[in-house]
Amino acid sequence: MPKIRIWLWLALLCCTLPLWAEGDRDFGDHQEIWVDSEEEFLAAVAPNTTIHLHSQLLDALIFTAEHWDINTEYANFAYVFDGVQLVIQNLHNFSIIGDPDARSRILAQPRYANVLTFKNCEEITLLNLDCGHADEGYCTGGVLAFENCHGIRIENCDLWGCGTEGITLTESSWLSCADTTIRDCSYSILSLYDSYGAEFRNCVMRNNREFSLLNVYNCREVSFANCVIYDNSAADDFGHGYLLYSSASDINFSECAIFNNNVNELLNTQDGVSFQHCTIFGNQPQSYVPGYDEGRAEDSDPDEEYYYEEW
């Protein structure tokens, strides 16, 4: 066989191998579904699907034990301490899109439930959502949790209060979180475990408490760019609290503003952590505030006199 034919045959083989490898996955037609109830939402959860939330018809999606019997191949409920939590699993190319102007609200009624939990999923998009808890809980129950998920996009979302933390990422890869606020969470801002490629861009992280705020364990390619992290409290009555607690990870902060955080130390270690053109000031132990204080100012004044340190 002439050499040119051999090379052409090898090129064709290389192009078709990825298609053969993915032959067991369903890449059918993409469907877009508009919903205005919990029942319609649960019925719509499927691969290759975009769910749009009718904000004008729906005040909030609230998943409770009343929906326990509505279990599908891709959406079911798991028991937690005070109720059930929704688990979306085993799908790819799935999006939840809310109102871009008002953000559509999804709430967890049990205090100890994650608002949304994703397991074994690929290509997940969450856009224009307002997610939180109706009542405050402790110990367990965050806002968004991902386990063995790959290709996650979170954009223009508000992840808030009473959840132990805004984002929990476990054994996952390629998370992109942009233009999103994480606020008023009871235990930390986020936790990343055994994951690769987590990027936070143009995010605001404020008024979270009570233990170390950014927790990163055995992760690679974690970055924070143009983020503002302020008015959080990691210093508790029982020990040291850090703004960043990292272990066996590489993390880069660039063009970030980190100020007025109540922390015993900024970092537990400098190994694997880098700062580029960040402004950091006013991060020191203050009077411990065990809960959100309605009487204090919502935001600190960045024009107050502080010592500025450029990293």
Image: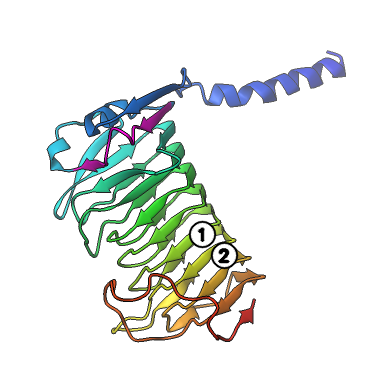
Q: Is residue 107 left or right of residue 67?
A: right
Report the residue marked by disc 2.
251
Task: Determine the secondary structure under disc 1.
Answer: loop
Label 1 CA crowd tier, 10 Å (few <14, some 14–19, many 20+): many
Front-most of residues 146 and 176: 176
Task: Pinpoint residue 191: horizontal percent, then vertical percent.
Answer: 41, 61
Front-most of residues 17 and 57: 57
Task: Determine the secondary structure under disc 2.
Answer: strand
Q: Nearer the viewer, mark 2 or mark 1?
A: 2
Q: Is residue 208 magenta?
A: no
Q: Which residues are magenta?
A: 49-63
* Count of numbered labels shown in the rendering: 2
Q: Is residue 23 placed above or below 62 in the rendered structure? A: above
Report the residue marked by disc 1.
219
Q: Quadrant of residue 128?
A: top left
Q: Is residue 1 placed above or below 129 in the rendered structure? A: above
Q: Residue at x 40, y 52 (%)?
A: 158
Do the CB atoms of the residues marked 2 and 1 lie less than 8 Å apart? yes
Q: Quadrant of residue 90?
A: top left
Amino acid bearing label 2: Ile
Quadrant location of the N terminus? top right
Quadrant location of the C terminus? bottom right
Marker disc for residue 260:
none
Q: Is residue 62 magenta?
A: yes
Q: Is residue 91 left or right of residue 59?
A: right
Q: Residue at x 51, y 59 (%)?
A: 219
Q: Residue at x 67, y 70 (%)?
A: 277
Q: CA distance from mark 2 to mark 1?
A: 8 Å
Residue 171 in view, yes or no: yes
Residue 248 in view, yes or no: no
